[in-house]
Image (tube, rainbow, N blue to C red):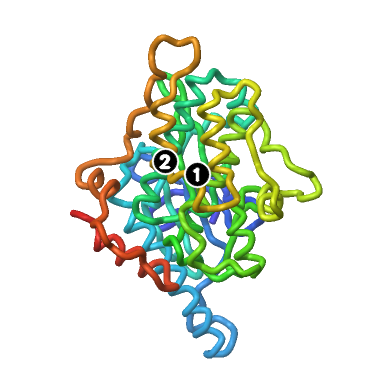
Amino acid sequence: MRAGDVLNGYTILEDFKVVGAGLSKWTFAERGGRQYFIKEFLSPTYPDDAAPGSEKTKAKKRARCATFEAHHQGIQKALAPLSAYGGNLIVTLDFFRWGAKYYKVTEKVDAVGLTAADVASLDLRTQLVLLKTVAHSLKILHDLRIVHSDLKPSNIMIKRTEVGYTTKLIDFDSSYIAGSPPPQEEIVGTINYYSPELLGYIQDAGVTPAELGVASDVFALGLIYTEYLTGAPPPFDPAFHEPSVAARSGATLRIPRAGVVPELADLIDRMLSSDPAARPPIGEVHATLMALRPPSDGAPAAPAGPPSVLRGKGLRTAHRRPSGTPAPTGRLVGKLLHKLTDRTDP
């Protein structure tokens, strides 16, 4: 597909570009006078009857495609009621197969491209808005027991608004139900932001699937917050190479205190705990941030307020789940998400 071609009703505006490690390509497209972001997955590919290979091989590929479809459709169904176009969760608006390839369509976000060092140079009031909005977006996921699983600065887009900046949380392709991650060999992401338990699971070092919950995201967010406030990851012995390796090896990660509000530093230190049970839940993170005020300021920091990601019954769904509802189990992420959505309040 090239610029000018039409893909399932979307007019391609630019040639596709390769993303990251080459697992996908992306471009922008237009339909109905609105522009969108389109991602093409390079794997899996669906084999039709004329595709090369034995019937047994094609049957295995089709089974993998069915699991892939169920995962993405489950994520899309679970999040669709919770976000509107223009909200702070950039959810999948369309997911389809075109020929052998799969495509995902989301809202196009005009990000400003601020780096962690750029954010670290902003005033505390502006930084707090960014911290609050991403915490609120993550809380929506965690209230549904959905683990984002690939939190990193590039998946938190920063957008300029009329009064400052806000964040847009993107890329839920790796998300899963807490306690039910995909097999180790299917885990993707950036090791720089792995939690200690995620690293142990991938390395088959005795971490069970049940130990991979929403606290894994909180650790990654603690790393990101440290970068947002100081311009760099928390310090650790460089022999460990990655924060998760250091934490798993017994090192205690802490945010440098210079220039950081003590209450905020205390919060982030807890988020960086090597013990998932010792980390604060995202609801507590968000509430703590909302209560903070910049020093030497007689008025509270301007609250971000609930970002405009909820509407109608989605507001209730995002914040309530029937008490006593057991955590979902099973391997098929898509089906689990469907079941979980069916159990949430209307």
Question: Disc 1 vs disc 2: Cβ atoms closer than 8 Å?
Answer: yes
Question: Pointer 2: what residue?
Answer: 35
Quadrant of the image containing the C terminus: bottom left
Does residue 210 lie above or below 252 as drawn?
Answer: below
Report whether residue 316 is seen: yes
Question: What whole-number distance in Å separates the C-alpha atoms at marks 1 and 2?
Answer: 9 Å
Question: Pointer 1: what residue?
Answer: 13
Which badge, 1 or 2, is on the more N-terminal residue? Answer: 1
SS of the residue at dot 1? Answer: loop
Residue 311 image offset from top left, x and y in percent: 24, 41
Farthest-out residue, right: 239
Mark 1 or 2: the one toward you = 2
| Residue 257 horizontal side relative to residue 78, left or right | right
Looking at this view, is 278 or 287 the one in front?
278
Does residue 22 lie above or below 12 as drawn?
Answer: below
| Residue 121 horizontal side relative to residue 333, left or right | right
Badge 1 crowding class, 10 Å Cα cut-off, few under 14, some 14 to 19, many 20 or more, is some
| Residue 204 horizontal side relative to residue 102, left or right | right
Looking at this view, is 15 or 125 the one in front?
125
